[in-house]
Amino acid sequence: MPMPQNGEVKGSLALTSKGSIAPEDVLRFHPELKARTDGILAQGWSYACVEVTGRATSSLTEENSKYWLGAPPAFMRSVSPKTGTLAPAEFGLVVYLGTTPPEVQAVPEVQSFLITISTKNFPSAVSVDIVKGIVTNIHFAFWRWEKGWESDKKKLSDAKEIYKIVAWLVDVEKFKLADVFKPERYQELIETFKALPQQDA
């Protein structure tokens, strides 16, 4: 006979989650990544998280917590296209933990930590994955810079702000450029902007 649908749980349970993780949990367990985000803030820029993935773990030690054991009703189960019959019921266990969910206790693996970096005047100027150390996107206001645009004060100001981020990431922090950004083009732009007056940036 199966266990009753309702009862009490006693013992320990290990929890592992793969996929999205809260950025604050990753930074709490990975000081090397926090150093990178702190470095961005120290430059006077800001960042926003786009995607943070990996593996988080926690554990539960329960004494007399309530549980519910059951299977979904027939209308929620799939039907086999070959036989037209309902798929076998898959039982699930719900443990009632109270009003406070278990906290992340470790983040043993971080697969990606994708952020956008903004200046005070230019949002989402550059995107980077701080786990892989790759610049994934550069705003076209800098990357598609054309000779003659320096006479346009707005274009020049925007491009200079992006230039400072990209140059810091690549030359100081040693980030790599994504494959779509050719090194020759990067060097050409760096030389161009190094030669421009910088006081307006």
Image (cartoon, helix red, strand yellow):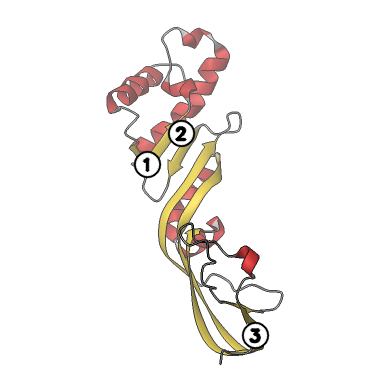
For the residue marked with disc 2, what is the amino acid? Answer: Ile
Residue at the spot x=68%, y=74% of the render? 100
140 or 159: which is nearer to us?
A: 140
Judge depth for marks 2 and 1 and give the one in front: 1
x then y, percent, for residue 201: 53, 23
For mark 2, what is the residue? 165
Q: Is residue 192 above or below residue 9?
A: above
Q: Under tag 2, what secondary structure?
A: helix
Residue 155 at what x, y percent from top left? 53, 16
Q: Nearer the viewer, residue 180 or 40?
A: 180
The relative height of residue 189 versus residue 83 in the rendered view (above or below) is above
Q: CA distance from mark 3 to mark 1?
A: 51 Å
Residue behind mark 1: 134
| Helix, strand or loop status at disc 3 | loop
The residue depicted at 56 percent of the width and 89 percent of the height is: 2
How many callouts does the rendering have?
3
Query: Is residue 13 or residue 120 the one in the foreground?
Result: 13
Disc 1 element: strand
Q: Sequence order check: which comes first, mark 3 or mark 2?
A: 3
Q: Quadrant of residue 166?
A: top left
The kind of residue on which mark 1 rests is Ile
187 versus 153 height, above or below: below
Marks 3 and 1, the one that precedes in the sequence:
3
Closer to the eye: label 3 or 1: 3
Quickly name the residue at label 3.
Answer: 5
Q: Residue furthest right?
A: 99
Q: CA distance from mark 2 to mark 1?
A: 13 Å
Q: Quadrant of the N terminus?
A: bottom right
- Kindly check if marks 3 and 2 are in contact, taking CB atoms under 8 A apart as contact: no
